[in-house]
Structure formats: C-alpha cells, structure tokens
Image (tube, rainbow, N blue to C red):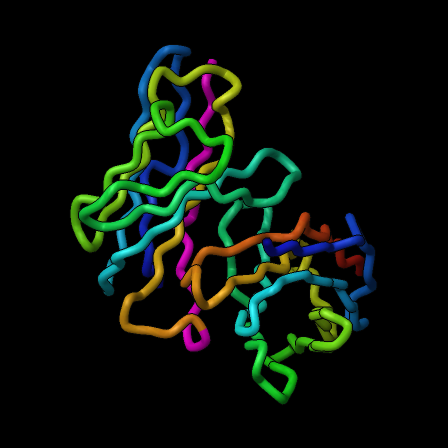
Amino acid sequence: AQKITQTQPGMFVQEKEAVTLDCTYDTSDQSYGLFWYKQPSSGEMIFLIYQGSYDEQNATEGRYSLNFQKARKSANLVISASQLGDSAMYFCAMGGTDSWGKLQFGAGTQVVVTP
Amino acid sequence: GAVVSQHPSRVICKSGTSVKIECRSLDFQATTMFWYRQFPKQSLMLMATSNEGSKATYEQGVEKDKFLINHASLTLSTLTVTSAHPEDSSFYICSARDARKKLSNQPQHFGDGTRLSIL
C-alpha cells in the first residue's frame, strides 16, 4: 500500500520569498513517480512537477524544484520567488508504474502568499 | 488549452435526482480514466478506475450501484450519481491518461471538476 504524508496544513509566505512544502511517502514499489499539483480556489488541478524514483537528478520546472531524498522517502517542493498567484492548495501525489496513472494524494498544504 | 473536458462544471439539483457527469479526452485516446471525489478542504480520494470496454474498478467503500461508470469509447467516460442525496454533494474530478505516453513522461490530465450540490 502507498501512503503520502503532508504535515503542513497551511503556510504563509511573503512575496518574493522561497517556500518549501514537505512531502513524505511510503511504498513497497521499486518503481514509482512523485507529483506535485496546485489547486487554486477554482478547483482545477494544475500539474507542477514530476520526479521518477530512478531519476538521479532533482526535477526542476521554472520556479519549482523538487528536493528528492529517496533514502528518507521525501519529495519536498520548493517554490522560489513566490508570487501572489501562487496562493493555492498544493498536493503531493504518488503513482506506481503498475497502477499506471492511478494517484494517491496527500492531505495538501494551503499556501497563502502575502504582499 | 484543456486536454480533458469535464461537463457540467456545476450542478444543483433536488434530492432523489440522478446526475450524469461526462469526462472527455479531447486530443488523445484514453483507455483508462479515473474518477476522484473531493470534500471541502480535503484531499482527492480515488473512487474508481474507468476502463474502456470493460467494467470499472471501484475503490473499497465506494458503492458501485450509487456511482455508475460507463466508458463506452476511447474518449468518453461518464459518472452517474444515482438517486443523489445531500451527502453526495461534493467536488468530482476526472483524469485521463494518454495511452501513448509512459507515466514518467506525461502525467494524467485532469478535468476542471464538477461541483455537485444536492438540496
């Protein structure tokens, strides 16, 4: 069974600052993928970044980077230079390659960016 | 632009009504689609996996007779909430995986969700 844990229910961050959102996971799969999604108040799920379990380098996508520590089973998201538009709910998710697209989501972290 | 279209975006109806939600992949074929449910301020919970041409696979605790899923074509899956009651009010969101792409190259694409309110 897979489990995703996000321990931060909410965070305030000042505009232009960096913020780290924590995510730990547990799985018995050898091959898996880790995802981060952003969900604004309108509800749509916006894909941010992906990390494969066999990827040796940490994933980066623009202002988003994933701090992947496989031994610790953590996949923290770092948002650099926060913008007001970054205020949203952020979900960490995991998918095993055998389940082929089926995702297990964490509880989410509400981020509020202040001026 | 959106690659998965979900319709309707919002439904308000009376208790006892059946409600159908559509999920369409617009520019790819999706042999598998997923239906999630999200209560306010909570996470997405997978309800079922919709398989084209075969029966859906439901997660534990999800009533298959309450939530009917039909995946009749490679681009369309429907979720019907039968005899809906106020406790079925929730945000329902679908996702579709592009069958041509590996999990590592492309995540599944999410629809914009349907807010269902049963009065």
Residue A20 shown in magenta: no
B64 over B98 or under it: above or below: above
Residue at 41 percent across and 22 percent down: it is B12
Picture coordinates of residue A39, whole percent (x, y): 58, 53
Q: Which residues are magenta?
A: B104-119
Picture coordinates of residue A53, whole percent (x, y): 58, 77
Residue at 21 percent across and 53 percent down: it is B75
Residue at 42 percent across and 54 percent down: it is B110
Q: Nearer the viewer, residue B97 or B19?
A: B97
Quadrant of the snapshot with the C terminus of chain A:
bottom right
Left or right: A91 with respect to B25?
right
Q: Nearer the viewer, residue B71 or A89?
A: B71
Picture coordinates of residue A15, whole percent (x, y): 78, 66
Query: Which residue occupies the extreme bottom position in the image?
Result: A56
Residue B116 shown in magenta: yes
Left or right: A103 with respect to B72?
right
